[in-house]
Image (spheres, rainbow, N blue to C red):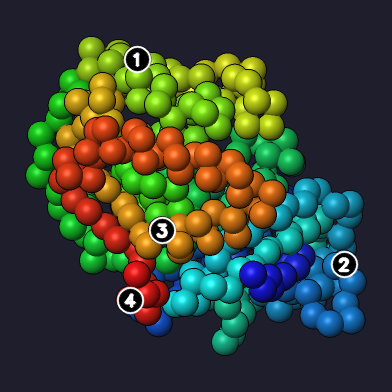
Amino acid sequence: MDVRTRVGCYAWIERDGAVLLSRWRGLTTPDGRVARPAWTLVGGGIEPGETPEQAAVREVAEESGYAVRLGDVLVTDAWSGLDDRDLTGHEAWQAVQIVFTGEVVGGELTVEVDGSSDDVRWVPLEDLPDLRCVTIVDRAWRAAGGPGLPSSSLSFGPVDEQALGRLVEATDGAAPRCGDVRVVAVDGPSGSGKTVIARALAADLGAPLVQMDDLYPGWDGLAASPALLAQQVLEPLARGERAAYRRWDWHADDWATEPVEVAVEPGGVLVVEGCGSSIGPAGEHAAVRVWVDAEPGLRMRRGVARDGEAYRPHWERWAAQEEQVFGADHTRERADLVIDTTPAQVSR
C-alpha cells in the first residue's frame, strides 16, 4: 500500500486567557460527502527545503498576519488512514504534526485570502468546548496544562449529510427506552465509519458521546462489552441516576487509573458508538439502533492504514469475534437504520 506523508507545523499561541485559532474552511468530496469547517491551530504543511520552525513561522504569518517567535516543541502527534477524498479507497496517508509554543512579536490580525482557512481569531480558552475543533487543538491544550476537549467537540471526517439527516430525524421521533434518555447506538463492524457518523450526530444534537473503545477489556473483549455498557452506563441512566464507566487503557492493557471514571449525566440524548453498542442488554435500552457497514476489503484497508500493518493480526482476531457476536445476535437485521459508507466506485 502506497503511503503519502504530510508534515504539519503549528504554534500554540496563548495570551490573556485566549488561544489563536484559524478556521479550516472544509470541503466536499467528489462523491458528495461533506467535511465541515473546523477550528485548528495556526500553522500548516512544511514545504521542500524548510525546517519545521521556518514552516511554522511562515504559516502563522500567512494565516493570521502575525510575526511570531517560537519557543520549545509543545507536543507532537501522528495519525494515518485512507484518504477519504480518494474514491478508490486505496491511497493511504500519514499526518505528522509538530506544535511549538509561540508568542506574537509583530503584525496585525488578518484573515487569510484564498487559502485553506477563512477566519482567524483569539478564542477564550473557556469557549473551546463550544467549538468544533480538530484533534491537534485537544492535544496541544492538554500539553499546555488544560483539561482538553470533550469527544463531542472534536471534528470528524467527510460525512454523508443525507444519511445523517435521516438519523437525526429518526432520533427526534424515537421514544426513550432508557429512562428519559434517548440512546442512539451506532453499531457495525470495524472500519465501517461508525466514529465519523457518531461524532457528527453528537455534534448536531449537542449530545454526549460514549465510545465502546473505552469499554472493551482488550482485544478479546467484544463479547463482554455490551454487558459492561449496560451495567455501568445504561442501567443507571434508566433509573435517572448519574452513570460512570471505567476506561480501558490500550497501551497499559488494563483499566485506566486516570481518570478512574468517566461520568455521564441522565437526560436528553446519548450517542453510543462502537461494535456491540446495540447488542443484548445494551440494545434493550437503545431508542435507535444504527448499523454502519462498508465493503469488507475496504474496511480492512482502512483499519491497517490507520493502525499499521503490525496490527493486522489483531484486526483479523477482532473480525472473527465480530462474525460470531453479530451473527448470533442478527444485529444488522434488527437495526432501525442501515448506512453503507462504501463509495460507489469501490467494487463489491
Please state the horizontal and vertical placement of residue 269, each as a whole percent of the image: 26, 36
The numbered dot on residue 231 is: 1
The numbered dot on residue 33 is: none
Please state the horizontal and vertical placement of residue 199, each as a whole percent of the image: 40, 49
The N terminus sits in image quarter: bottom right
- Give the structural element (helix, strand or loop) at label 1: helix
- Give the structural element (helix, strand or loop) at label 2: helix
CA–CA distance in space, label 2 to label 1:
50 Å
Disc nearer the start of the sequence (2/1): 2
Residue mark closest to the camera, 4 vs 3: 3
Could you say which is closer to the camera, residue 318 or residue 197? 318
Using the rendered view, name the quadrant where residue 115 is placed.
bottom right
* Position of residue 203 in the picture relative to residue 147 (left or right): left
Dot 4 amino acid type: Ala
The numbered dot on residue 344 is: 4
Residue located at (89% from left, 54% from top): 71
Disc nearer the start of the sequence (4/2): 2
Residue position marked by numbered label 3 in the rendering: 296
CA–CA distance in space, label 4 to label 2:
42 Å
Residue position marked by numbered label 2 in the rendering: 53
Disc nearer the start of the sequence (1/3): 1
Q: Are marks 4 and 2 in contact (CB under 8 Å)?
A: no
Residue mark closest to the camera, 2 vs 3: 3
Q: Are marks 4 and 1 in contact (CB under 8 Å)?
A: no
Residue located at (44% from left, 30% from top): 222
Please state the horizontal and vertical placement of residue 159, each as a whole percent of the image: 37, 64
The C terminus sits in image quarter: bottom left
* Position of residue 234 in the picture relative to residue 302 (left or right): left
Residue located at (77% from left, 56% from top): 99
